[in-house]
Amino acid sequence: MSKTLRPTSEQSLLLLRYMIMAREFDAAMLRLYRQGKAFGGVYSQLGNEATSVGSAYALDRKRDVLFPMHRNIGGHFVFGADLDQLMVNHLAREGSQMRGTDGTGHYADEKLRIYGNVSHLGAMIPVAAGFVLAARMRGEDCVAMTYIGDGGAQVGEVHEALNFASVHKLPLVLIIENNRYAYSTPNELEFACAKLSDRAIGYGIHGETIDGTNVETVYEACARAVKRARAGDGPSIIETLTMRMRGHAEHDDYAYVPKEMLAEWTKKDPVETYAKTLVERRVLTAADVENMKKSTLAEMIGAIDRALERPWPAAEEGFRNVFIES
Ligand SMILES: Cc1ncc(C[n+]2csc(CCOP(=O)(O)OP(=O)(O)O)c2C)c(N)n1
Ligand SMILES: [Mg+2]
């Protein structure tokens, strides 16, 4: 089955391109944070590019919906988000979809079919389940994909939403991004089961644990989950194994993470390994990869310059939609 789902050369180039976009956007945000130009938390995407891109790519963005989390910038690109708009959002400048009140993607965009992220861990999953229930009641064919971390997966609402979605066979795909840490808490202090996908048995749904650093593996597993969801077979849990390669956010020096662990996962860098695979398959050359990186970096620099030319949003915007206005 997985063979038939293997991306074509054209699709594989797109997967690589989206991952490079995610990588360069992330690198740009890390620099901007150090320059004092990005505010609030900057949550690095490093190591999560394949999970974010491969999962979102399995959806049909014309009819499905994405409920991303804080390390899913790749999915925004897959769903057609405009780079300039994303940069303005993240730099909280005038024109930001969150009116400058936030810099980590807490926006909903009906046109893009992106809703998220809900900051309170676990709380987004019932919203995603409710979305597809409503869509079903309206007679629409719509699959929702949403995400939770290894830490967030322990929150009660995740269970409630999964149980409800399973009973009603809702077309929901939950990606559990197991990047080994929730802030400084390691897996062994978060849960006692062998695999987080084992929980699927308790809901009577499909569950699997996959290599979250391989974009094709992620795409194939998610495409199968989307197919099942669309066919009326209900939700799936896909646990993607990755490593959070930096701190929780950029204020965190992640001194509690063993250096050997990071070194081990560096060898599985999602962008570099996929670029190498595509060069070996002769889909592109090493020089093409370098050019792709260079042109993406130039795109980022352009977007940053344009965003920084914009003024700050008006201070009153900070109070809008916070209190009920009568
Ligand atoms: C209910 C709730 N508790 C605590 C937080 C603060 N918080 C935000 S992210 C995070 C760690 C999440 O870890 P994990 O779910 O593993 O995701 P990761 O950041 O590793 O991708 C915490 C504690 C929150 N947003 N919501
Ligand atoms: Mg985590």
Image (cartoon, helix red, strand yellow):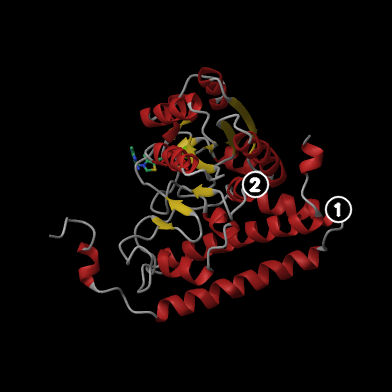
For the residues carrying marks 2 and 1, which lies nearer the camera in this image?
A: 2
Q: Position of residue 128 (x, y in %)?
A: 45, 41
From where the camera sits, is residue 235 visible? yes
Mark 1 element type: loop
Ranked by sequence position, the earlier of labels 2 and 1 is 2
Can you tell which mark lies on residue 88?
none
- Residue 58: image tag: 2
Spatial CA span between label 2 and label 1: 22 Å
Q: Label 2 amino acid? A: Ala
Q: Amino acid at mark 1?
A: Arg
Q: Give the SS element for disc 2.
A: loop
Q: Which residue lies under the disc numbered 1?
A: 281
Residue 2 coordinates in the image, percent (x, y): 77, 37
Of all residues, the one furthest to the left in this rendering is: 326
Q: Residue at x 42, y 35 (%)?
A: 152
Q: Residues within 10 Å of mark 2 (few under 14, many from 20)?
A: many
Task: Please name the residue shown 62% across and 51% down the image.
Answer: 60
Q: Nearer the viewer, residue 201 or 304?
A: 201
Q: Is residue 115 above or below residue 256?
A: below
In the rendered structure, the answer to whether residue 15 lies left or right of residue 239 reads right
Q: Residue at x 66, y 73 (%)?
A: 295
The answer to which quarter of the image holds residue 235 is: top right
The residue closer to the viewer here, 248 or 121, is 121
- Side of 31 where 41 appears, left or right: left
User: In the rendered image, which quarter contains the N terminus?
Assistant: top right
Quadrant housing the C terminus: bottom left
